[in-house]
Amino acid sequence: MEEPAYAKLNLALHVRAREPDGYHRIETLFAFCADGDLLSVEPSGRLALDVTGPFAGDLGAAEDNLVLRAARMLGGGRGAALRLDKRLPVASGIGGGSADAAAALRLLTRFWKLDVAEAELLRIAAALGADVPACLRSKTAAGEGRGDRLREIDAPNLSGRPALLVNPRVPLSTAAVFRAWDAVDRGPLGGWEDGRNDLEPPARALVPEIGAVLDALRGARFARMSGSGATCFGLYDDAAARDADDARIAAAFPQWWRLATRLR
């Protein structure tokens, strides 16, 4: 039995305030790609996780992985042999561990045949991280608060749209980017195309390559950095335009990571 961990995009991300507890109040629009990491499970008397894939070596100890934390919170001591095919770069602003944890909750609910209400799954998800509730649903949604107060939105003009994700292969700490935010509230989120990512300026100061990535997505109808970076994405009118950018970037910047996909 297996479950995708869909890559997350922030089509817009407005940071409204830094709260006394150190967290930030944000307004964002989540969208999800058709591709991402892949989590699979087999029967076992104990709970264990094996990590494979091109980015397995960038993760810390498996015991600290959000997949196992999610499984322990959900399973109450049940066993499972989990395998995570880590296809998405780590610390890259596209969900990563949050998407993996959400996939674990979905997969193990089925595998263990649990009768768990969505409200309980969302409660567990919120305890694992601010992005995990959105990743649990993996549907286009507006997020407020820490990003965990969700409102699903109907976006037929987004579903199926070709997308290209590009990362310069430079890890970027979410905490460092938020610390570097200038604390200026630039206003609420309206339409996503008219929005912005308030974390892009501090992220570009830390990783200047982000600017080069955005410039390279020149065939996209719309390009923006996702989350706290360093992954950027382009949305395209058709797959041919996306694939042309993909081929050109592969030739010019072979060291960069790329994912040609579409929105769910």
Image: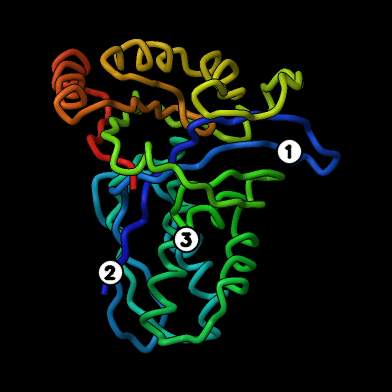
Mark 3 to mark 1 CA distance (whole Å): 22 Å
Q: Which residue is drawn at 68% across and 45% down?
A: 146
Q: Residue at x 31, y 51 (%)?
A: 86
In the image, what residue type sits under mark 2? Answer: Glu
In the image, what residue type sits under mark 3? Answer: Ala
The x and y percentages for residue 31 are: 44, 42
Q: Residue at x 81, y 38 (%)?
A: 19
Camera-side mark, 3 or 1: 1
Q: Residues within 10 Å of mark 3 (few under 14, many from 20)?
A: many
| Quadrant in the picture for the N terminus | bottom left
Q: Name the residue under label 1.
A: 25
The x and y percentages for residue 155 are: 44, 42
Between residues 80 and 112, which one lies in front from this camera angle?
Answer: 112
Q: Sequence order check: which comes first, mark 3 or mark 1?
A: 1
Tell me, for residue 101, which label it has, or none. Answer: 3
Q: Name the residue under label 2.
A: 2
In the image, residue 66 sits, relative to residue 105, either above or below, namely above
Tell me, for residue 1, which label it has, or none. Answer: none
Q: Which residue is drawn at 62% across and 50% down?
A: 130
